[in-house]
Amino acid sequence: MALSKRVRPDLVFGRRRSLVPLVGLVLVLGALAGCNPAWTSSTKLTVSNVTATSLDVSWPVPILDGDTTVTEYAVLIDGVTRTVLPGSTRSVHLGDLAPSTAYSVEVRATDGKNQVSIPGLKGTATTAANSAVITERRTITVGTLTRSYRLDIPAGYKGSVGARLVLGIHGGGGSPDNFATTTGLPAAAAASGWVVAYPEGTKGSAGFTAWNAGGCCGGASGNKVDDVGFIDALIRQLQGRFAATKTVLIGHSNGAMLSYRMACERAGLIDGFASVAGDLFFSPCTPARPVPLLEIHGLADTNVPFNGGPGSTATYPPVMDGINLFRTNNGCGATPATSTSNGVVTATYSCTTARGLRLITIDDAQHAWPGGLNTGVGGTPSTKLDATATVRAWADTL
């Protein structure tokens, strides 16, 4: 009996054809026949009209199943639904955002068959930095004294958004405006969206403005001015006004010493403090909880010598006394990780109960604010470190 030949479809016309593309085609067609709304992988969200606290987002119509239409779009920020829009709308204005912040934005489409695109069209939208501040001059009465302070509020601040509160505390003989100008802190604060208060010390009989940091300085210490009470009242008032998410002290010299004292006596009010050319000159220091600390100090500082001894207005304890006290208080190891660059040594301690302790020494720095404006006071500022940028980067991590 003659055998009939079976014709293999993959050998028609004398050449082999793969069945895989045919199978793939069937799968693709099957998927398209019942797919949810979707965008191609190359489709992007469009971000426009960006400010420090708002931005606009727009998107194209997704690929739809058959002749259905989009009935609504849900817009999510960081995974949380912010608003739901009708299907005819393909843009949204997002407000009440924080400055200099990257947000994850996702748009999900729902079609007439109640099918939802999950995941939706995703992208990242970043708000702008604040470029200006509004400055207020205010007073607060503490006990029998009326105290003054300067208050800088980011121009884009929205009352419904919690702010990071920073107190910039000037050194002996200084003032709020002088401290702001010398350090350049207003620009850094605006870029980070901080609300900054610059309190003013009291003048002694010699006209020298100072703070009562314990063992120093001027008439404030001699007259036992209640500067802790002043800073306490100011912090509480501003925390309430701005719904502060964090409170950080940044001080220079005598102002840094007051920051140390606040950490000793009012640890529960603050989330960290930065001391530039300062020292712990208060005893007993018994913080109620761990307090993150950044100390920046020049090894050529003769006003407040790093190793202690006679200085400009007193005989100071070694800076390491304060470092070691807070190292123990913060649950830090005894040996820090160190790095050295151009005479700048950074020692970072590993701590179990606080967000760290860091000591930065600068070989050529005197008492002036490193990287700051040269005012002729405290020597020439070292150019090996920008103390303001360093403090800002540290404070933003708290």
Image (tube, rainbow, N blue to C red):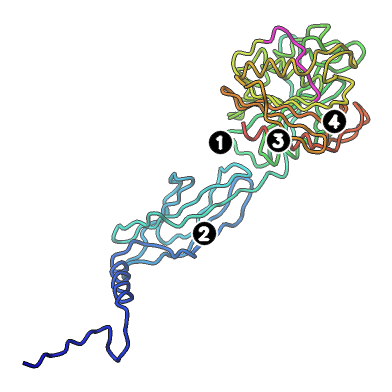
Q: Is residue 196 left or right of residue 243?
A: right
Q: Amino acid at mark 3?
A: Arg
Magenta span covers which residues? 277-285
Question: According to the image, label 2 marks what residue?
Answer: 45
**Image quarter hosting the N terminus:** bottom left
Mark 3 and mark 4 in contact (Cβ < 8 Å)? no
Q: Earlier in the sequence, mark 4 or mark 3?
A: 4
Q: Is residue 366 left or right of residue 47?
A: right
Question: According to the image, label 1 marks what residue?
Answer: 160
Front label number (1 vs 3): 3
Question: According to the image, label 3 marks what residue?
Answer: 392
Q: Position of residue 37 (x, y in %)?
A: 37, 62
At horizontal 49% and vertical 65% (from top left) the residue drawn is 42
Front label number (1 vs 4): 4
Question: According to the image, label 4 marks what residue?
Answer: 363
Q: Amino acid at mark 2?
A: Leu
